[in-house]
């Protein structure tokens, strides 16, 4: 009589069938092995796996981060997945959409939304942010407001503004579509801030994997101007969903942008609209209707981003908007 397979056997069989160029989460593997609540057990089983026919490097965390790997750590795991073609423009190629927390509504509107990723290997760009230092006006506003509580940093990139926020907030989630950028920011966080800092990999053009009414604040700098209006409406709606009553949205929005490549050719991001300070302020007020808003204006002098893809020169004006959600929302 053949003995029944153990849960560990079932897990190994599931992982063995993950094709090259794809990935599954620990939670998905647990569910397919018959116990959806045993994601941690799956992690423990993979940690002791040395069978090369069982590709445990293709099993990742539900927040989109890669997790550990017992034969070389996260960097080795990332390199293996990259060599297999597991990284698409929107992140990892997954057997299901569980990592991105897709809803039926997301699926219906997926083609109408928009995101931008520059395919930069942030782990090879050194400790400093490739985007330079924090803008002085942004530093001034954050220091004046003394932000507190639980905050979400959208499109955080390689962490240029993380330390600035971590000085006063109680906890910070840094999010980005690029796991490399978040890995770099995680490595560079000061030891004194590590306990209150976490990362989440997700696309802001889709539903945020954040609990409703859980954030005291949402911060976003340097990226929202590249999205078309329909995606900005989605992002504003998601910010509203995750903010607590009286929560704060703090947004830096670039206007009057001048951008050219190092070869002198103009560099325009597809779908990007040309905003002035006036038109951006009107648009943001419409998106955050019912919020108490305040705006600051400043400008960025010509800068060069040699590690961007492609490298380019940049200058612009920009708005900083503070929008406080009504306690009645």
Image (spheres, grey):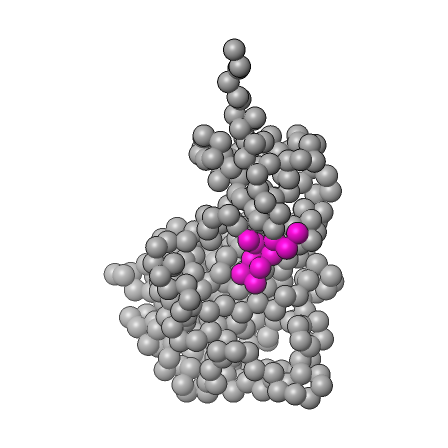
Residue 91 x %, y %: 56, 57
Q: Residue at x 52, y 25 (%)?
A: 7
Q: Position of residue 82 (x, y in %)?
A: 66, 54
> In terms of image quadrants, where is residue 282?
bottom left
* Chief secondary structure of the magenta portion: loop
Q: Which residues are magenta?
A: 84-93
- Which quadrant, please, contains the C terminus? bottom left
Q: Residue furthest top?
A: 1
Quarter of the image where one finds residue 55: top right
Query: Which residue: 71% across, 83% down?
Result: 262
Q: Nearer the viewer, residue 60 or 312?
A: 60
Q: Position of residue 165 (x, y in %)?
A: 55, 61
Residue situated furthest left in the rendering: 328
Evaluate whether residue 55 shows in this view.
yes
Q: Is residue 219 magenta?
A: no
Q: Is residue 52 above or below residue 7?
A: below
Above or below for 177 versus 24: below
Residue located 43% across and 76% down the image: 228
């Amino acid at each position: 009589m053949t003995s029944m397979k153990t849960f560990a056997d079932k897990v190994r069989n599931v992982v063995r069938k993950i094709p090259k160029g794809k990935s599954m989460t620990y939670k998905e593997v647990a569910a397919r092995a018959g116990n959806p609540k045993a994601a941690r057990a799956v992690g423990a089983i993979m940690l002791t796996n040395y069978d090369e026919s069982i590709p445990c490097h293709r099993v990742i965390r539900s927040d989109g981060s890669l997790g550990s790997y017992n034969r070389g750590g996260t960097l080795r795991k990332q390199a293996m997945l990259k060599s297999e073609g597991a990284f698409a423009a929107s992140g990892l190629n997954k057997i299901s959409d569980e990592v991105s927390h897709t809803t039926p509504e997301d699926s219906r509107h997926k083609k109408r939304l928009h995101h931008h990723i520059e395919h930069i290997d942030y782990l090879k760009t050194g400790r400093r942010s490739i985007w330079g230092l924090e803008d002085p006006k942004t530093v001034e506003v954050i220091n004046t407001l003394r932000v507190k509580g639980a905050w979400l940093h959208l499109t955080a990139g390689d962490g240029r503004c993380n330390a600035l926020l971590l000085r006063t907030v109680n906890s910070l989630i840094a999010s980005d579509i690029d796991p490399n950028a978040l890995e770099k920011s995680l490595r560079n966080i000061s030891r004194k801030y590590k306990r209150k800092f976490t990362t989440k990999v997700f696309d802001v053009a889709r539903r945020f994997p954040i609990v409703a009414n859980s954030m005291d604040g949402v911060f976003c700098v340097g990226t929202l101007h590249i999205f078309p209006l329909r995606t900005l409406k989605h992002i504003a709606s998601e910010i509203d969903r995750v903010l607590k009553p009286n929560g704060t949205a703090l947004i830096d929005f670039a206007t009057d942008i001048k951008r050219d490549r190092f070869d002198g050719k103009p560099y325009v991001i597809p779908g990007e609209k040309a905003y002035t300070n006036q038109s951006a302020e009107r648009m943001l007020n419409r998106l955050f209707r019912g919020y108490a808003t305040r705006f600051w204006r400043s400008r960025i002098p010509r800068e060069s981003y040699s590690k961007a893809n492609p490298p380019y020169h940049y200058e612009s004006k920009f708005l900083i908007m503070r929008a406080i959600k009504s306690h009645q929302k």
